[in-house]
Structure formats: C-alpha cells, structure tokens
Amino acid sequence: MAQNNPLFESRTSFLTYLDRNTFDVIPGTECSICATNYQEGGEAPVQLPCMHIFGSLCLEKWTQQSATCPMCRTILHPIPPSKIEYDQERARLQAMAGWLASQKVRLVTEEILFQQEWTKLNEETDTPTFHPGIRRITEALLVRNRFVMRVNAGIEEADAMLGLHHFSWIDHDANERGRDQFRRLTAQLEALRDEFTQALGL
Ligand SMILES: [Zn+2]
Ligand SMILES: [Zn+2]
C-alpha cells in the first residue's frame, strides 16, 4: 500500500498520541519490540492508527531511528531534511566502499593471473628481460601494486567511519557532523577511484 503522507504531522503530535492512547491488553501480553510483558516492562501498550500495538517506551526509542511502524512500515511522522541528507551521504560512502571492495578482489585475481602468465613465459624464453610479454606483465603489476595499499586503507577507513556513526535522527548536530565527515571521506575515495581507473585504463 503506497502512503505518501505520514500519519502524524510532527514528531511532537506523535509523542502526544503515545501519551494519550494507552490500550488494554490481556495480562501477560508482551511488547513485540522488547519481548517483555507489559506488567514487567513498565511501559504502556499503545495501539497505532495502523492497529499495531507496541510498548510506548519502545515506540519512542524505535522512532528515533526509523519513523515507521515496526510491523507494517506505515510512515508515522515526517523525517527532518538533515536526516535524509545524512542517509544520502552515508549511502554514497557505502557505495564507494563497495566499489573499492570489488576492486580489491580484482587486484588479487589479476595478480594471480599475471603471475601464472609470467611463470609460463619465463619458462619459454632465455632472455626474460627483453621478452615483450614479460615486460608488459611486469609493468601491469607495478601499476597495480601502487594501489593495493591505498585501496585496502580506503576500505578500512570507510568501514571505521560508517561504524562510528549510529546517531538518532533527532540529534541534528550529530547528523550534520556525520554527514560532513562522510562527504569528506567520499570525496577522497572518489579521487582514488579516478586515479585508479585512469592508471589501469578502465
Ligand atoms: Zn517494549
Ligand atoms: Zn503498523
């Protein structure tokens, strides 16, 4: 079911709804987010307009990361632009890290193939230094070796940066900071990608 508009016009009106719409459930019923029964968990069951019932505390916490119903994904309240931009920058960095990871595999595979070819040609000739095939392979390996360390370092940096940031979207300053850090590293990795594709003639 396509839904364009959030059910609540703001997060504030959503939180007010949580306060005012506690729901009577059969004793022993569990909140399906924290799997604790409502009597023990100390949170009131709330029924959302999409009919799904969760604990009020869990819903408040859940919606700090995602503004949708945990069950049916109905959009509950608007997501601020800073969070949308944060997600976009994060996705760009993730895509860049993914591209580098695939190039890491390429470098390893190519090195094996070049080594095999080199060994074969080396056995066929008495003057390997002057063999055009061997010279071509040696040059190709030299070019690739210049990138191995940098590609690996780039992947590690991106992983570390992505792992560092688990902000809730209501923390606007953290969103801004994270977004700028993602953007800076993405730009660095894009420069590495351009250099890499040019050097390898891709
Ligand atoms: Zn709960
Ligand atoms: Zn729902």
Image (tube, rainbow, N blue to C red):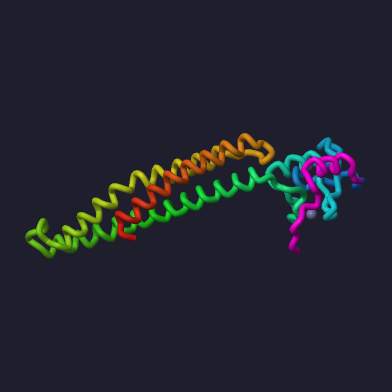
Q: Residue furthest left?
A: 126
Residue 38, x across and y down, in percent: 84, 41
Q: Is residue 176 left or right of residue 12?
A: left
Q: Is residue 196 magenta?
A: no
Q: Is residue 139 left or right of residue 12?
A: left
Residue 34 appears in the rendering: yes
Q: Is residue 68 left or right of residue 105?
A: right
Residue 1, x across and y down, in percent: 75, 64
- Rendered-image quadrant of the C terminus: bottom left
Identify the residue shown where x is 25% and y is 53%: 141
User: Is 113 situated above or below 193?
Assistant: below
Q: Tell how many labels.
A: 0
Identify the residue shown where x is 66% and y is 36%: 171
**Ligand 1 - quadrant of the structure image:** top right
Residue 108 appears in the rendering: no
Answer with the quarter of the image where residue 116 lies: bottom left
Q: Nearer the viewer, residue 19 or 2?
A: 2
User: Is 66 situated above or below 57?
Assistant: below
Q: Is residue 127 left or right of residue 99?
A: left
Answer with the quarter of the image where residue 99 lies: bottom left
Q: Nearer the viewer, residue 33 or 132?
A: 132
User: Is 43 situated above or below 66?
Assistant: above
Q: Is residue 17 magenta?
A: yes
Residue 24, x across and y down, in percent: 92, 46
Residue 56, x across and y down, in percent: 82, 41
Identify the residue shown where x is 54% and y is 37%: 164
Identify the residue shown where x is 90% and y is 46%: 23
Q: Which residues are magenta?
A: 1-23
Q: Residue furthest front?
A: 81
